[in-house]
Amino acid sequence: MQDDSANILAMRARAKQLVVVTTGVQSLASDANGYVRTTGSFITDGFARGMELTPTGFTQATPGLVDYVSALTMTIRGGRTVAGAAGGRSLVVGLPSIRFFEGVEAEEAGVIIKEPLAERWFVEEEYVPGAAPRQVTGGPFGQLECDFSYFLKLYSWEGMGFAAPFKVARALLNLYPPRDEIPLANGDVLRVNHSPAPRRTQLLSAEQGWAVISCEIPVRYRTANSV
Amino acid sequence: MTFLSDVSAFATKTKERRQILFVNVCAAVKASITDGSSVTGAPGQPVKTGNLKDSWILEFESPGLAIIGTNVVYARAVEENLRGVTFRNHGPHSVRLTVNGFDQLVEHEMRKLGTG
């Protein structure tokens, strides 16, 4: 039978795996303006103005908004705490860490977040049941065909170009390719719909300071009727 | 009646029924968006003053082309349920759910039309 809780948790678990851009684990440093490297290239890695990155291996763990990207330096809005070069560090752009998931309080580093924070990305989740289920195979315990749409709305800081929100939205949709299977613990298998396939809206102006792209993943699956 | 005339009569009837089905489906699509539909799961347009719901139009540009739309500025925010939008009734994503359930809508209208 349908289990909306299992459905939304499965979709959410996949979204949390999103990695848009990463430096990989390597030697990185930070100065008062942002991040610095001596080898490789932030540009080649794919970083873009307007992205929100999460540092790992630095004392300052708060995400930062990218203001400017060059091959060896990346300026972060508000600056960074100085840290000399050390290995085992990385900078990653993934699913925004401020997450307004359905039925869950947004929190970051143990602090509850009630409202979006200025100059910070955030994501809103929606689970929308679709049309009523249809029994597609006859008799008792026949198969019910069910639909739902899973929305993730990416709110980026406005006025920093389109490259960052476009890239993050496309990477998110690519996590759910049409016809891909997402198995559930109860044995049902969610299947990303192909007609229509996952899609996103244009970049829309949201409440003051943010722009939003809404990504929709339509899903169809079958589950046994209980009678 | 010859076989040829039978086939010709069948073709004429099919064209007529296709046109009726097209009109009925268009009406059903608009109704799904504005009023909601158990077939598509669309909740329908929220109503406060009625401005948004009443703004939706269905226009036939030709026998095979219809346009369904609204010119209300905040329709997009309502459809996408952007932050700051609140709902007293009905809900968001009616257009999206209607699109996603289009096949079921057509099948439903075909069954209503019957075999004639």
Image: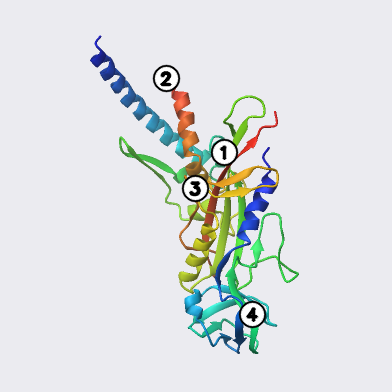
Give the labeled residue for mark 3: B52
Same chain for mark 2 and mark 3? The answer is: yes
Q: Nearer the viewer, residue B18 or A206?
A: B18
* Discs 3 and 1 share one subunit: no
The mark closer to the camera, 1 or 4, is 4
Q: Distance between the residues labelled 3 and 1?
A: 23 Å
Q: Find disc 4 in the rendering and name its residue.
A: A89
Which residue is at a point 48% across and 49% down the rendered structure image?
A197
Where residue B55 sits: x, y (%)? 45, 46
Image side of residue A187 versus residue B46, left or right: right
User: Of helix, strand and loop, which one carries label 2?
Assistant: loop
Q: What residue type is labelled 2?
A: Thr
Q: Residue B115, which numbered label?
A: 2
Q: Is residue B23 above or below residue A103?
A: above
Residue identifier under label 1 = A131
Please indicate, yes or no, whether residue A48 appears anywhere in the rendered image: no
Question: Residue at left 54%, top 42%?
Answer: B44
The chain identifier of the residue carrying mark 2 reads B
The first of marks 1 and 4 along the sequence is 4
Mark toward the viewer: 4 or 3:
4
